[in-house]
């Protein structure tokens, strides 16, 4: 049978009871999902709208909203398991979440399916990596982030080879997801693939969009150079990591580095720090590419049309640079936003 004949045969099965017919449609759609015939799956689902018009359409919308709500509840449950270090339980949930999304979706020429975690990631990708002007099909939830969490669970279960494969899927969906790049770097290092580890760190530093990603990049480099007994470079990377975020793990490593034998490492002058990093071809601070993108977005009139979005990008720029002028502008903008919020509540 051709496509229309199949759809008509399914349509003829519908009973006239919308709840029963909804179940029929979902069962038939699931059959085509398993066959990876996603266009057919979608057409089968729309049979409910064809049968019941606006009522059928609303039934489908409500079902979609319920599914999104359920996924969010499952996601929270999974995160709690991670916090409690119950990684097997967290892994089971995240696999269920991933299975709700068919990744091998039909793609037209020059289309791309990406799953961005935030607005800046989306804009950064479009401005810097979209040379072929591909259309971005934004998924309703960041599926790439699901794969990151699956990789995180597997990493803690010490299945490092699988971590690398899973995070490849994450980065296929979101090429600028730096958290996945960094976790994959750690897995490479655990397996002794030092060149791939260093390549991933370079990639992470190039695309890092927040202080936590930058701090983690330099922390991982500090551990690497500490293991090589290169005290100066390890010390320099510790200092740079501390410039963004200070953690107990970093402090512990910093103390170990300072205990290493040799000349006094307590240098604070910027030129020496830059010289050490330059000698190892390590990027110093935020990527010029990220900062240039932020500058473009902040100068764009469309960005300034929305104060919350402008504040979001401005705060990101300040977080990365600690520029005092940006801090002054942030404070003024914050007052403006508070006044707007106050007027809305009057």
Image (cartoon, rainbow, N blue to C red):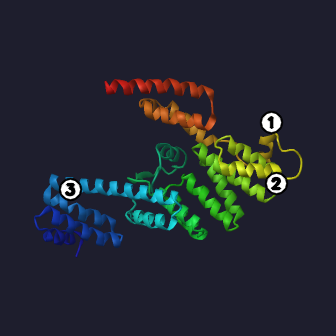
Q: Residue furthest right?
A: 263
Name the quarter where the N terminus is drawn.
bottom left
Separation of marks 2 and 1 at Cα, in angstroms: 19 Å
Could you tell whether 241 is left or right of 183 in the image?
Answer: right
Compare marks 3 and 2 and give the one earlier in the sequence. 3
Instruction: Work out whether mark 2 precedes mark 1 in sequence or the reverse, and give the earlier one.
Output: 2
At mark 2, the secondary structure is loop
Task: Name the secondary structure under disc 3.
Answer: helix
The mark found on residue 269 in the picture is 1
Q: Foreground: 82 or 215?
A: 82
Q: Which residue is mark 2?
A: 230
At which x and y percent is residue 293?
56, 39
Asked which quadrant contains residue 7, the reply is bottom left
- Would residue 309 be found to the left or right of residue 278 on screen? left
Residue at image point 46% right, 43% down: 119
Instruction: Choose top left, top right, bottom left or bottom right for residue 307.
Output: top left
- Mark 1, Cα crowd under 10 Å, few <14 / some 14-19 / many 20+, is few
Residue 10 found in image quarter? bottom left
Residue 290, percent from left and from top:
59, 42
Which residue is depicted at the point 45% across and 67% down?
92
Could you tell me if the residues under marks 1 and 3 are in contact, i.e. CB atoms within 8 Å? no
User: Is residue 242 among what the camera can see?
Assistant: yes
Which residue is label 3 attached to? 59
| Location of residue 195 in the rendering, given as x and y in whole percent from the top left corner | 71, 62
- Horizontal side of residue 156 vs 114, given as left or right: right
Q: Earlier in the sequence, mark 1 or mark 3?
A: 3
Q: Which element type, helix, strand or loop, lies under badge 1?
A: loop
Q: What is the x, y in percent for residue 153?
A: 53, 64
């Amino acid at each position: 049978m051709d496509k229309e004949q199949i759809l008509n045969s399914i349509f003829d099965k519908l009973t006239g009871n919308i709840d029963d017919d909804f179940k029929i449609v979902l069962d038939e759609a699931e059959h085509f999902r398993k066959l990876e015939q996603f266009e057919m799956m979608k057409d089968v689902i729309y049979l409910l709208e064809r049968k019941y018009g606006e009522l059928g359409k609303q039934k489908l919308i409500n079902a979609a909203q319920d599914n999104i709500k359920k996924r969010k509840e499952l996601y929270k449950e999974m995160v709690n398991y991670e916090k409690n270090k119950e990684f097997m339980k967290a892994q089971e949930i995240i696999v269920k979440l991933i299975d709700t999304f068919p990744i091998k979706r039909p793609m037209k020429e020059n289309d791309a399916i990406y799953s961005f975690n935030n607005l800046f990631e989306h804009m950064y990708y479009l401005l810097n990596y979209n040379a072929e002007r591909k259309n971005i099909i934004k998924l309703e939830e960041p599926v790439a982030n699901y794969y990151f969490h699956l990789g995180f669970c597997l990493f803690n279960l010490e299945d490092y080879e699988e971590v690398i494969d899973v995070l490849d899927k994450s980065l296929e969906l979101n090429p600028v997801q730096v958290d996945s790049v960094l976790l994959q770097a750690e897995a490479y290092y655990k397996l002794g693939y030092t060149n791939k580890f260093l390549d991933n760190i370079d990639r992470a530093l190039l695309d890092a969009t927040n202080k936590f990603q930058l701090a983690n990049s330099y922390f991982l480099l500090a551990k690497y150079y500490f293991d090589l007994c290169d005290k100066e470079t390890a010390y320099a990377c510790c200092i740079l990591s501390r410039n963004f975020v200070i953690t107990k793990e970093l402090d512990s490593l910093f103390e170990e580095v300072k205990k290493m034998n040799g000349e006094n490492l307590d240098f604070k002058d910027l030129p020496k720090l830059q010289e050490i990093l330059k000698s190892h071809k390590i990027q110093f601070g935020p990527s010029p590419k990220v900062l240039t993108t932020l500058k473009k977005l902040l100068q764009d009139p469309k960005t300034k049309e929305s104060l919350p979005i402008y504040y979001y990008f401005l705060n990101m720029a300040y977080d990365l640079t600690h520029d005092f002028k940006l801090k002054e502008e942030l404070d003024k903008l914050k007052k403006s936003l508070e006044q707007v919020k106050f007027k809305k509540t009057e």
